[in-house]
Amino acid sequence: MLMPLLPANYLPVNHLPRVFDADQRYTVDLHMHSTASDGALTPTELVKLCAARGLTHMSLTDHDTMEGIEEAGIAAQQAGLCLVPGCELSTRWQGINIHVVALMPGGLQGPLVEGLALQREARIKRAEVIAERLEKMGLPDALEKARAQAGSDRPLGRPDFARALVAEGVVDDWAGAFKRYLGSGKKGDVKAHWPEISDAVAWVVASGGVAVLAHPLRYGLTRRKRGLLMDTFQAAGGQSVELVSGQQNPDSTRDLARQLVERDLYASMGSDFHFPGSHAAPGSMSLIPRTAAPPIWQHPRLVHLRDAPSGMLGPGS
Ligand code: AMP
Ligand code: MN
Ligand code: MN
Ligand code: MN
């Protein structure tokens, strides 16, 4: 009997496990950026790099936009890997800028369409406020200078202002720009324009997506306060937390895993890759520990990821 012909780019079985039963790495990266926001690679270049590094599943999660997804989907089809459409939403919780990764197996649809339009407006208005503040602090024509650094007409982010501060010699380097002007609690860290975390999570969930609390160890919260954030996030419909984001301390990871297990939250993973030559590369994360927290691909909305063929991941595809 002849075997049925499979498309050339079909990945036969990816064997994503149903549980995390050993300290291990996986060929999955669900948090990365492209030139559609503050990443250095085009969506096509990013997908090719992921394929070259042996990833089987990836998500493109640009800040507050899904403009890069269509291009990434075509590249993923060609490269033979599975792309989950996504984005990373800027939100507010108790005066802190909290990021929520939206994984959207059905693509951009539902209330998230309007949500991303609001985020775009918020980002444009916020850039004007950041520019005004930096002008008072010694960077004349800040908006124009950040725009020149962005090199395209996308809405600006703090990294564009960071590059402008470096280029004008106001600070020595990128780290100094965040430390003195743009980082958490500094004048250029303008948050007022972002939605409440609960509203952003509601957009994602009502649009067929899975909301993932991004890099929970990076907000400088105590364990107790991180738990409160996770409670608020979950009460709004949030389903998952990044158990591993880039490189992190194994003890912190195990501690975080316990907080997921206590709440029945799914565990996600991502490098938060932005540009080659940095500490991060696609798929380069700390080990996922043995834990009872279920892998995010066990969530009913993403379970077809486990043995998905290549290309854009659609609902039930
Ligand atoms: P925005 O989306 O405009 O609020 O900018 C946030 C982005 O700035 C993050 O996704 C990082 O790419 C970068 N960023 C934020 N804080 C820092 C920091 N302390 N050091 C370096 N980059 C940072
Ligand atoms: Mn970024
Ligand atoms: Mn982030
Ligand atoms: Mn990110």
Image (spheres, grey):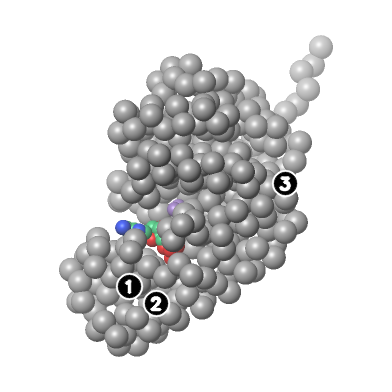
Q: Nearer the viewer, mark 2 or mark 1?
A: 1
Within 10 Å of the Cα at label 1, are there few (<14), some (14-19), or many (20+) other Cα atoms? some
Horizontally, is 282 left or right of 3 in the view?
A: left
**Residue drawn at (62%, 69%), measured in percent from left and top?**
118
| Amino acid type, residue under disc 3 in the picture | Gly
Towards the viewer: 136 or 162: 136
Give the quarter of the image for residue 57: top right
Residue 53, position as x, y percentages in the image = 43, 37
Q: Earlier in the sequence, mark 3 or mark 2?
A: 2
Residue 278, position as x, y percentages in the image = 30, 50
Q: Secondary structure at mark 1?
A: loop
Residue 18, position as x, y percentages in the image = 59, 20
Name the residue that disc number 3 marks: 208
Q: Earlier in the sequence, mark 1 or mark 3?
A: 1
Q: Earlier in the sequence, mark 2 or mark 1?
A: 2
Q: Secondary structure at mark 3?
A: loop
Towards the viewer: 59 or 3: 59
Direction top: furthest residue:
1
Towards the viewer: 197 or 40: 197
Name the residue that disc number 1 marks: 187
